[in-house]
Image (tube, grey):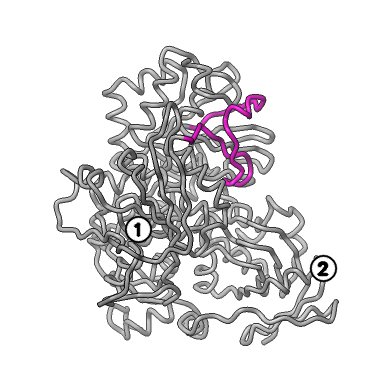
Amino acid sequence: MKIKGKAWKYGRNVDTDVIIPGRYCHLSEPEDIAPHCLEDLDAEFAGKVKKGDVIVAEDNFGCGSSRELAPLAIKSCGVGAVIASSFARIFYRNSINVGLPIFECEEAVAGTEAGDEIEVEPGTGAIRNLTKGTSFQARGFPPFIQDIINAGGLMNYVVSRLGGAGRSQG
Amino acid sequence: MPGKMTISEKILARHAGLDEVTVGQIVNAKVDWVLANELSGVLAIQELHKAGIEKLFDPDRIILVPDHFTPNKDIKAAELAAVFREFARTHNVTNYFEIGRMGIEHVLIPEEGLIAPGELIIGGDSHTCTYGALGAFATGVGSTDVAAGFAIGEVWLRVPPSIKVVLGGKLKGWASAKDVVLTMIGELGVDGAVYRSLEFAGDGLAHLGMSDRLTIANMAIEAGAKTGVFPADRVTEEYLKGRVSRKWRAEPPDEGAHYERTLKLDLSAIEPVVAKPALPENVAPARDLRDVKIDQALIGACTNGRLEDLRVAAKVLAGRKVHPSVRVIVLPGSQRVYKQALEEGIIGALIDAQCAVSTPTCGACVGGHMGVLAKGEVCVSTTNRNFVGRMGHPESKVYLAGPAVAAASAVLGRIGTPEEVVG
């Protein structure tokens, strides 16, 4: 299924403290964290973001804390995907583990302005800027990571590894 | 014969049951320890519940430390801590550390003798990389990775390229390990080591004690690194005496191992520095920032909350008073550090200087509690992050520094150097 929405454009080193500030990290329900997503970077974001919108950012997106609430907050807001020139490594893992679609594509970042209409094909990493009529290809995932994505996240992989041992009945 | 490998490659190969690994390869590795705090831990516990997993791979290999919003800052935090505690009890987790018996995880865990060289550790906290100081491969992960680690005792890791950081010479005057790591981050940038491992080497290591190494490894993540690892040597062995009795196997780097690049730092040329808001790479000499007035100074936390750090702070503050317009919060890293500091007269000296001394907690560093900043306020802090809103209001500002500069600034009411106070 294609992801389609408006681009929210940010710069380099968007850290997890601005994605979801520490003061909200004792919350865990999606509806509690979503209103605070990116509030210290862009106070308008959480109120105006629409389902399917895409965050487009420069290098090192998600640097800092290991809080999994960061990709969860973005997902809770309805964001369809994050496209960045590069991701900080813990955020990268966490996004794959929680099922937030992420794509590394420097060219797409350079070729996108805030408000552009963006379309992404998650299966192939094909990115289109519908406003500008341009197309880009995101970097592919290593096969092992693609397997985790296809399995629907890391816990499904773990459950299949355990094969019933250690699991509760029913 | 396997190829020449770095410390990180050797540890990953051994834990993956392989003779050899190469950069970029993804391995499934067995972990020696999985750790979590109450924030990362409770999300991990929820993941286990959702997946219907009731059995942990090994309750003796799990470390749980409620340190972020504890002592409980409010009812929600109290409920998180309660779920965390209940999980530890239900599963008979050996290394659960309750309030009064705990510390800030990255100060407490090495101190308790839980980490040994050559081990592989994942933790639901980005500063898990601290244990690289002991010659271990330790890296931060999120809650789902922690849940997977709890369940199967394994983690997938991409073998990182390594950057060699050669430390030469010896620190002079008031320059400290914090100044070394801030200077390094200033040179590498906050994304200079993303997906990479930093490996420390050089004759300067002989002059860096374990406390210094823990401070440096703690901030490897601030350059984006997966870990920052020191070779185990006599300093390491000395530290492990009386702490670790089990067998361990250090993994020295092979002669001729491949490093993507080498960064050289002359320790004797390093001076007290400060990282300006809002990135740890914005490094400038402390002497150049004398016009920055401060409202608060924070001394302690996982970066600088060890006894050695508090000694330095007391050297500057003893017999003096905190500036009338400044609040000082001292966060000893563990109960043991707190008690030793008390016995050495450090706590008394800090209280006489009008510092507030807190029980160990991460609260202030993450803008949770115990020292949250108001709009427009400025804090000099020995913590590791100065991002927008990190310690409170998005319009508050954090300047990162070592204990000597933080203590001197507390006396001066503005950023300054220890020489200005002590002479």
The quadrant in which the N terminus of chain B is found is bottom left
Residue B103 visible? The answer is yes
Residue B292 among magenta residues: yes
Q: Quadrant of residue B400?
A: top right
Q: Name the residue tied to disc 2.
A: A115
Q: Nearer the viewer, residue B3 or A108?
A: B3
Q: Quadrant of residue A10?
A: bottom right
Q: Which residues are magenta?
A: B269-298
Tell me: residue A78, above or below residue B392: below
Q: Circle 1 sits in a helix, a strand or a loop, which is it?
A: strand
Q: Nearer the viewer, residue B193 or A162?
A: B193
Q: Chain of mark 2?
A: A
* Residue depicted at x 40% and y 45%: B167
Q: Name the residue tied to disc 1.
A: B35
* Residue depicted at x 40% and y 73%: B156
Q: Is residue B412 left or right of residue B334?
A: right
Q: Is residue B191 left or right of residue B22?
A: right
Tell me: residue A164, above or below residue B3: below
